[in-house]
Image (spheres, grey):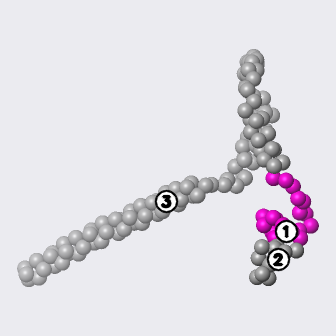
């Protein structure tokens, strides 16, 4: 077996280099690539099948609505309660939106508390000044 690069000690290539990673696997089956291509083409051809006329769907005559019976109402209410017990999964956008709303409420509440404290402090200072000035006037009269 003389290969092109036999002078350099390299073995001639007997296998397809694309099969290199598949050799030695127990589940390896050799398949021709043309079969896979045929399948892909077949799938595409099936998709291009001319559309058939849409079937005419007969509209069902809706019966007149009657008020729900007591049992039906209880069953419906129970189903709603069970649905509320199940966890709801939120998307990342929904979670961030909820978190922002919650934070905004916290900030507003904190701001209201600070405003209340500030107004109380102002009133306290006013009362203090008034009392101080009243004492000063009393001392001057004596």
Q: Residue at x 7, y 79 (%)?
A: 141
| Residue name at image x 15 percent, y 75 percent | 134
Quarter of the image with the N terminus is bottom right
Along the polypeptide, which appears first: circle 3 or circle 1? 1
Give the residue pinned by disc 2: 11
Residue at the left extreme, as displayed: 141
User: Which residue lies under the disc numbered 3?
Assistant: 100
What is the crowding at mark 2: few (fewer than 14 residues within 10 Å), some, or many (at least 20)?
few
Q: Which mark is residue 14?
A: 1
Q: Nearer the viewer, residue 22 or 15?
A: 15
Badge 3 element: helix
Q: Is residue 17 left or right of residue 128?
A: right
On screen, residue 16 above or below 2: above
Check the image and report above or below for 51 versus 16. Answer: above
Front-lying residue, 30 or 72: 30
Q: Element type at marker 1?
A: loop
Q: Is residue 108 left or right of residue 51?
A: left
Asked whether 15 falls inside the magenta stretch, the response is yes
User: In the image, is residue 8 above or below residue 97?
Assistant: below
Closest to the observer, 17 or 43: 17
Q: Which residues are magenta?
A: 13-33
């Amino acid at each position: 077996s003389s290969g092109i690069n036999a002078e350099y000690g390299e073995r001639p290539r007997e296998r397809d280099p694309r099969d290199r990673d598949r050799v030695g696997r127990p589940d390896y089956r050799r398949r021709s690539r043309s079969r896979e291509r045929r399948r892909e083409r077949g799938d595409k051809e099936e998709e291009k099948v001319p559309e058939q006329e849409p079937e005419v769907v007969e509209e069902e005559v809706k019966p007149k609505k009657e008020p729900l019976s007591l049992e039906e109402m209880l069953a419906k209410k129970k189903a709603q309660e069970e649905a509320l017990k199940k966890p709801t999964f939120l998307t990342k956008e929904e979670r961030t939106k909820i978190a922002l709303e919650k934070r905004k409420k916290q900030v507003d509440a904190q701001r209201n508390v600070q405003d209340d404290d500030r107004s109380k402090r102002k009133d306290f200072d006013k009362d203090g000044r008034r009392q101080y000035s009243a004492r000063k006037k009393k001392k001057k009269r004596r």
